[in-house]
Amino acid sequence: MALQLRIYVPPHPLIKHWLSVARDVNTPSAIFRSAMTELGRWLTYEAVRDWLPILETTVQTPLAECPATYVNPQVPLAVIPILRAGLALMEGIQSVVPLTSVYHLGMVRNEETLECSCYLNKLPPAFDPQTRVLVSEPMLATGGTIMATMEELTKRGVDPELTRIISIVAAPPALQRLSVAYPQLKVYTAIIDETVNDNGFIVPGLGDAGDRTFGTHEG
Ligand SMILES: O=P(O)(O)OC[C@H]1O[C@H](OP(=O)(O)OP(=O)(O)O)[C@H](O)[C@@H]1O
Ligand SMILES: O=c1cc[nH]c(=O)[nH]1
Ligand SMILES: [Mg+2]
């Protein structure tokens, strides 16, 4: 069977609740950040089910020995936040997977051309091929940013099969580009919206996630 990009939209009331708070134009920046933290937490909880490496052993309770399952500390775990907006999910992501290495990638879109460029790259020269990778990228719009990110990761040895994208709002153009180039990937998102407008914004979306997180929007 041919591989196909999997997009998970967990049907969880907490995810729906915090997405609605984040979408609301009247939500102030401080509450928007709380909503992003909660969305990062619950989407990561869903994403790591079949992603965290485990170790089967035994444990001695006060009464008897019994089977035990632990998270395997030998297998490297990495989170890649795409600045700026990806930082908003980090508190939630790290509450679920505290023992990960964090490698920052700063990407910004040109507001006219919508082309993205990289202004900060803290990726290591190479990843262990066993590394489990979570990419924190809340907005998948035209897909330029996530495609550039995946290129930087895969050329350093990251296996798309072991990679999960934690997103909040995903749009068809980005999902189509990912599905052609990286069918082994899994995307966890709070919602799939219908369109991206001529200015590159997801509609209905939630506006500019970076500006709303950091209180930098005008007006
Ligand atoms: O799929 P795309 O069309 O590439 O758009 C998605 C990117 O756009 C936004 O970044 P932005 O350039 O606004 O930077 P910011 O996060 O610093 O605000 C958003 O945070 C994503 O990274
Ligand atoms: O709607 C969008 C699209 C890209 N980036 C954002 O922050 N919001
Ligand atoms: Mg922005």
Image (cartoon, rainbow, N blue to C red):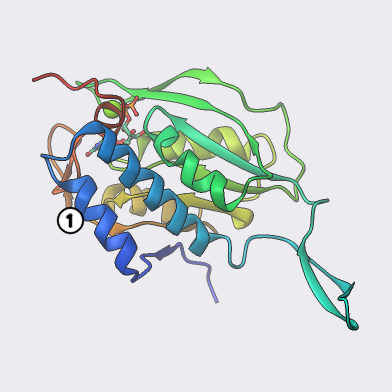
User: Which residue sits furthest top?
Assistant: 119
Relative image position of residue 19 (x, y in whole percent): 26, 53
The residue sitting at 39% across, 27% down in the picture is 84
Relative image position of residue 54 (x, y in whole percent): 76, 65
Where residue 180 sits, quadrant-wise, is bottom left
Return the residue at label 1: 194
Q: For the residue marked with disc 1, what is the amino acid?
A: Glu
Q: Secondary structure at mark 1?
A: loop
Foreground of the two, 214 or 3: 214
The quarter of the picture where the N terminus appears is bottom right
The residue sitting at 35% across, 53% down in the picture is 175
Relative image position of residue 118 (x, y in whole percent): 46, 20
> Is the residue marked by circle 1 packed among few (<14), some (14-19), or many (20+) residues within 10 Å?
some
Relative image position of residue 9 (x, y in whole percent): 36, 65
The residue sitting at 17% across, 40% down in the picture is 27
Where residue 115 sits, quadrant-wise, is top left
User: Would you say 10 lies left or right of 78 here?
Assistant: left
